[in-house]
Image: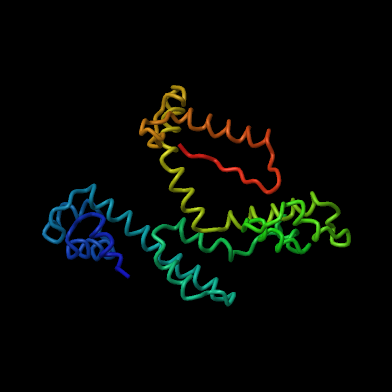
Amino acid sequence: MPTIAEILARELDKPLAHVQNVIDLLDQGNTIPFIARYRKELHGSMDDTALRTLEDRLSYLRNLDQRRQEVKNAIDGQGKLTDELSAAIDSAATLAEVEDLYRPYKQKRRTRATVAREKGLEPLALLLLDQGRDCPAPEEAARDYVDPEKGVETLADALQGANDIVAELLSDDAAIRKTLRELLRPVHPAVRRGLGTGYPVRDALHPVRSGDGAPVAAGDYFVNKREQFEKMKENPLQNGERHSIILP
């Protein structure tokens, strides 16, 4: 695993020795203006911008290292830290990724999914989530889980409980959260530009492109998503069918 100095040298495209010298100077309490003006021989005449970027990233990466260790200790305290999970945490490049990996192991408040699990609905949730070829229709699969003594009065109660569990499982999945974050990240600056300047959001272009390669307006993107969801609401699932949201 590369050291913080090596990561910074790669990110800034600077010699490792110069980066390490700046780290040492900062750790000794020297300020950026002082380092920039009086220690040029130690860092190859980096300008203030590069030095401040280095300082900011150094702080972030050290916080990231600390948080990685805190998360591993917390999971290890529960007896659930595996070699694979430890390696995934060590390779997480951002604090968000570390928190995503930790999310399933955090002490949660009592949720609807927790209540559903207590009612014995997790097997139903996993069956429906898997959506295997031999998976029966949801209503048929739910019949075996109706149990008034456990508070599951109807098929609808069983399916709602399974839905709550599936929603939590997907929300806690680090890979899904990372993928969604990468998909949605390009949209945000465009939306902010559209709203921040007083121009219609529809006029702000973002990097998402349609099938023919043409840029898609942020407003059109969200209108399209809203229309798809409206169609889903008007045409609920039948006999185990699956809806999918098509990205441009």
Query: Picture coordinates of residue 40 (x, y %)?
Result: 13, 56
Q: Residue furthest left?
A: 41
Count of marks, rendered view: 0
Quadrant of the frame with the C terminus: top left
Q: Quadrant of residue 66?
A: bottom left
Q: Residue furthest front?
A: 134
Query: Which residue occupies the foreground of this view, 233 or 181?
Result: 233
Query: Picture coordinates of residue 238 (x, y %)?
Result: 70, 43
Query: Picture coordinates of residue 224 (x, y %)?
Result: 53, 31
Quadrant of the frame with the N terminus: bottom left
Query: Which residue occupies the foreground of this view, 177 or 146?
Result: 146
Q: What residue lies at 81% left-to-right and 57% top-to-bottom?
A: 143
Q: Residue furthest top?
A: 199
14 on left or right of 66: left
Q: What residue lies at 46% left-to-right and 51% top-to-bottom?
A: 179
Task: Say if 140 sits above or below 16 in the image.
Answer: above
- Scheme of colours in the image: rainbow
Query: Which residue occupies the foreground of this view, 72 or 36?
Result: 72
184 on left or right of 225: left
Q: What residue lies at 45% left-to-right and 32% top-to-bottom?
A: 191
Query: Picture coordinates of residue 26 (x, y %)?
Result: 27, 61
